[in-house]
Image: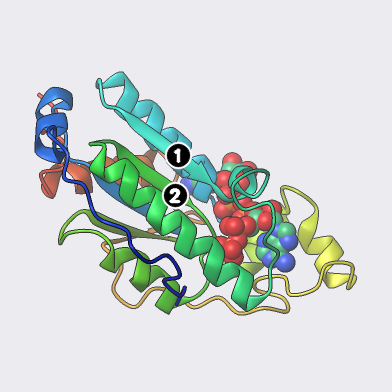
Amino acid sequence: MAEQKATNITWHEANVVQTDREQLLNQKGCVIWFTGLSGSGKSTLALEVESKLYQRGHLTYVLDGDNVRHGLNKNLGFSPEDREENIRRIGEVAKLFADAGVIGMTAFISPYRTDRDNARDLLDEGRFVEVFVDCPLEVCEARDTKGLYKKARAGEIKEFTGISAPYEAPAQPELTVNTSDQSLEECTANVIALLESKGLIPVSQ
Ligand SMILES: Nc1ncnc2c1ncn2[C@@H]1O[C@H](COP(=O)(O)OS(=O)(=O)O)[C@@H](OP(=O)(O)O)[C@H]1O
Ligand SMILES: Nc1ncnc2c1ncn2[C@@H]1O[C@H](COP(=O)(O)OP(=O)(O)O)[C@@H](O)[C@H]1O
């Protein structure tokens, strides 16, 4: 857990609050947290859900592991401590998106259950939706979209998730999609249906 270093700081209440912004946007601010192995389909699925929600007039934002590690988290590597800090920061950023009324989506391996649960605890009940993007390691490795598994097997990348670093599957995710036997369309439809059933977006007419 990150240490609270700053002292003499005071919380300022805003005039316009989350519910005001939600009325404006006709949606509930929330976080859809995609977790799974590299190559399981987190980014592909998050971006497809975003396209579908955009077509329905919803405001979304996708935070993607590779992209965030080019900026905000460029000083973090892949040790357990750095992954923890990576996910802690993303959890806090995602919370800000939800407070802004946005449907925030995160596509990080987020391999540790405790780190994901800490991100969940930042949000009010029902506003954190964990989606386990389940896909066997063999399938992810066969896809090898970025050639990283090959490098990891050759020992050129240390601490690679699934090969030489752990992945802890969620115990009770709100949804599991299996990208090795469900199509992208099916997985996307399941995520959208879940958002509807939880009242985070209105049901499609
Ligand atoms: N050692 C190691 N282990 C796993 N992944 C690695 C590693 N080195 C680089 N990459 C690339 O970084 C992406 C994962 O970053 P994340 O921020 O999602 O990782 S984590 O949540 O902090 O574990 C991951 O992207 P995805 O394939 O989109 O998951 C990889 O492209
Ligand atoms: N049902 C599915 N959902 C998402 N991706 C899928 C699915 N079926 C096959 N794929 C493919 O799997 C790969 C997943 O890559 P990517 O989205 O970059 O994964 P990740 O972000 O988890 O590393 C893509 O090439 C994508 O086309």
Amino acid type assigned to the residue bearing label 1 in the image: Val
Comes first in the chain, label 1 or label 2: 1
Q: Kindly identify the amino acid type of the residue bearing the numbered disc 2.
A: Thr
88 on left or right of 120 = right
Q: Is residue 119 left or right of residue 126?
A: right
Name the one closer to the observer, 196 or 30. 30
Which residue is the site of mark 1? Answer: 62
**Can you give x and y, in whole percent of width and height, for residue 95 in the image?**
32, 51
Residue occupying image coordinates x 53% and y 71%: 84
Mark number, residue 164: none
The residue at the point 30 percent across, 29 percent down is: 53
- Mark 2 residue CB less than 8 A from any atom of ligand 1: no
Q: Which residue is mark 2?
A: 106
Residue 41, position in %: x, y?
Answer: 53, 50
| Tag 1–tag 2 contact (CB < 8 Å) | yes
Q: Residues within 10 Å of mark 2 (few under 14, many from 20)?
A: many
Q: Residues within 10 Å of mark 1 (few under 14, many from 20)?
A: some
Residue 39 x/y as whole percent: 62, 54
Of helix, strand and loop, which one carries label 1? Answer: strand
> For numbered disc 2, what is the local secondary structure?
strand
Q: Is residue 190 visible to the viewer in this orientation of the structure?
A: no
